[in-house]
Image (spheres, rainbow, N blue to C red):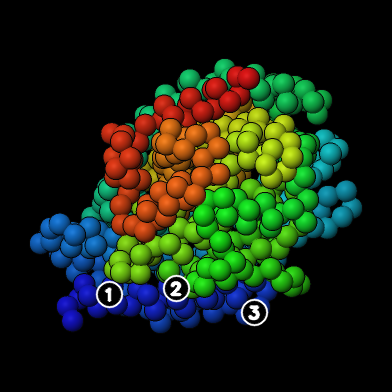
Amino acid sequence: MNGLEYIASRLDAFYEELGREHYLLGAGLKSEPQIGEIYRKYRDLYTAETIRALEEALTMADGETSRRVRYLLAFAYSNYMQSSVSTLTEAYLMKEMETVVRVNGEELPFRKAMSVLQCIGDRDKRRGLEREISQKLGEMNHILRERVMCLHDIASEFGYRSYMDLYSAVKGINYGGLMSALDGFLRRTSSLYRDLLEDMLHGIGVELEEAERHDVYYLLNSAEVGGDFSRENLMPSFTGTLKKLGIDIDTQKNVILDLEERENKSPRAFTAPIRVPEEVVLVITPRGGADDYAALLHEGGHTEHFANTSPHLPAEYRHLGDNAVTETYAFLLEYLLTNRNWLEDFVGCDDAARLFLFQKLFFVRRYSAKLKYELELHAAREIEGMEEVYKDILDGILMFSNPPEMYLYDVDDGFYTADYLRAWIFEAQLKSVMMEKYGYAWYRDAEAGKYLIGLWRYGQKYSVSELANFIGYQGLNVDDLLDELQEGLAS
């Protein structure tokens, strides 16, 4: 067995152990994590020697072999970096778990305080809590600064000018070109976004010029929606949606639904692709509420993608590749919440469509701002003064005040931010094709389900740009996303 085949042969075992560990921990079936032990066991998959061997193999590869080597190389780089900063990552997480926020005489664990913030109706209390959170972040930022600088040093050690250049090269993504397209999107949605945000903030008694981050997250969390978003209706709406597409999740032998209530179970739905496609677990704690419906539909998209991936694909195409692909399918089901027919069919009221469209616009703009900032952060050799760069960029695009102390907390490793953005763009393109083929209520047509299964079979062999070509586009284009939001929010 040559080096390439040896590495590929161990991917399935690595992801099976890792996926099962994440499932057991998230499902509340285990309390002592052994993730570090799993990474150490498979250390040979991402050593510096492995990276150099894969880079050499890439110079001699062509066709399908070249694609497989590129995916393995991106995997090796990512895990080598994560391993190299694991001590700092663990130190930060430990500090975060130990940190207590004190506000109004009450003590809250840091992580709980972050989620409680968006539920507080009293603005003074909300502002006070956010300032306490920001102060604690400021006290922990020295660990994150050291971690980012270490990642930058690793990129230099491998001969890259910057962390950004490394990821652009190994992932084959032109981040600058993506940002240029998003700059156009931001300009063309600026007035629409401002008017909507200003109007919604008035509903909670806040002027746009005075708005702060905590105000907007409270606004998004507390907005009332019509219809039956109850706990009892959650699973029937989800399984009913799949059945209209010709998919009976209850009879899918490779899909496990974990619906049991456990004390330490994650409150939010998640997918554990343990063996793709033979064993995929969808973990749910039904509670009810619109956010729960969004999470379940999103994770359901991941689950069906993994469960319908061809078992004949090599491990690189079942586990690696372009993560924007699986995020696209997750978004496609999640944003059925913006489809008025779906809302009428499953929750009995279509009033929520506009709110979900605004949330989509908000998060696309927010992640565009994050990417713009991350490109500056990771192109730089020094990160002094990046707090103000972060605040200036986010304040300008989101049109409200953001705490500068979040400038490292609010960063995704490996430019996963860009994967989400590319998924939002391609989801709109794919949905346009689906509506053209099967109508606005495409989810009611079993032929649409067959069409999706045909795409899911490819796993993540192809990038979203390649898939866009397959369905009739010339790569990714923001126009469909822009049209969807402008038309849906103008009414």
Q: Amino acid at mark 3?
A: Lys
Tell me where residue 220 appears, x and y as whole percent.
70, 37
Tell me where residue 84 appears, x and y as whole percent.
40, 67
Relative horizontal placement of residue 480, taking residue 20 as reference (left or right): left
Against 205, is 422 above or below? below
| Residue at the spot 41% in from the left edge and 59% down from the top edge | 150
- Would you identify the image quadrant in which residue 311 lies? bottom left
| Residue at the spot 69% in from the left edge and 38% down from the top edge | 344
Viewer-side residue, 285 vs 150: 285
Relative horizontal placement of residue 141, taking residue 161 as reference (left or right): right
Tell me where residue 476 appears, x and y as whole percent.
35, 36
Does the CB distance between marks 3 and 2 fall below 8 Å?
Answer: no
Q: CA distance from mark 2 to mark 1?
A: 21 Å
Q: Amino acid at mark 1?
A: Ile
Q: Which mark is residue 31?
A: none
Against 484, is 384 above or below? below
Q: Secondary structure at mark 3?
A: loop
Viewer-side residue, 263 vs 454: 454
Q: Earlier in the sequence, mark 1 or mark 3?
A: 1
Q: Amino acid at mark 2?
A: Glu
| Residue corresponding to mark 1 | 7
Against 105, is 2 above or below? below
Q: CA distance from mark 1 to mark 3?
A: 29 Å
| Residue at the spot 51% in from the left edge and 40% down from the top edge | 442
| Residue at the spot 44% in from the left edge and 44% down from the top edge | 423
Q: Quadrant of the C terminus?
A: top right
Viewer-side residue, 98 vs 416: 416
